[in-house]
Amino acid sequence: MNLTYIIKRSSRRKKITITVERDRSVVIHAPESISEEIIMKVIESKRQWLYEKTKHPQKYNEPLHPPGKELVDGESALFLGQAYQIRLTDEESEKIQFKRAFLIPRSFSADREKKMRDWYVDKAREEILPRVVSFARYLGVKYSKAKIVDNRYRWGSCTIKDNVHLNWRLIKAPMFVIDYVIVHELTHLLENNHTPRFWNIVHAQSPRMEKARQWLLENGQILEEEI
């Protein structure tokens, strides 16, 4: 297999890691001081793994309307795991409407991204927070507060004060993924660490746990995009 890759070096990096991006590009992250020879040996040792990753049909299939980079007519954005088209409308409105498509007034031209983010946050509060209440009841746990937060690098957290924080970007993911993250964080109220007992509890309340974890692994970077 012919393999094309990019090497990115950093003085802060301690070891070599390899990532396969959604566009099938291979990126080698390496310490500044490590030799090209060592990098080549690592790549050779991972050649079969790289072949499987770059050919993986599920991970690299593009959705029917892949999420766009701009909020313009004909592009798309995610909601609950599905990509929906964006349609610019001449209708006078103070907010984005969703009718199996994102209807965005043209008058929002200067701040469409902010309006879209606000829409996502509102929907996250509306769709996610009630599920926290339900799962807490099933698990028999009590938390202090549940909040939708802006945290790019964590999907959720359970604080030392028993507050449950959930990333607003989760509203772009399928509901079974959202449920997994909720259950994961609430289970920390029963078991602090990721022990076998912890995972048994999570799996009991989230039977599609492994699929959800895999979905986040494969699609997390798309959720992190602003739209």
Image: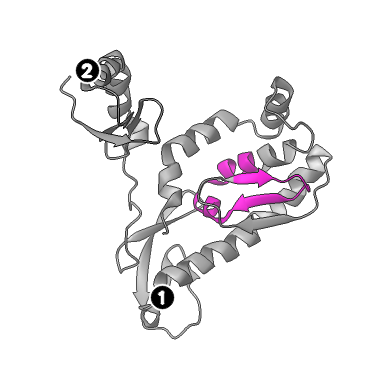
Whether 136 is drawn above or below 84: the answer is: above
Question: Which residue is located at x 70 percent, y 23 percent?
Answer: 195
Left/right of residue 148 with respect to residue 109 in the rendered view: right
Mark 2 and mark 1 lie on one chain; the one further toward the N terminus is: 2
Q: Which label is found at residue 96?
A: none
What secondary structure is found at the residue carrying circle 2?
helix
Image x and y of residue 7, in percent:
25, 33
Q: Residue furthest left?
A: 2
Within the image, what quadrant is residue 204 found in? top right
- Which residue position is annotated with label 1? 111
Q: Residue at x 15, y 22 (%)?
A: 2
Q: Residue type at mark 1?
A: Asp
Q: Give, as a single range, the part of the protein colored magenta.
A: 156-181
Residue 139's x, y, as percent? 79, 38
Q: Is residue 132 left or right of residue 53?
A: right
State the image coordinates of residue 52 (x, y, percent, origin top left). Answer: 31, 22
Residue designated by label 2: 37
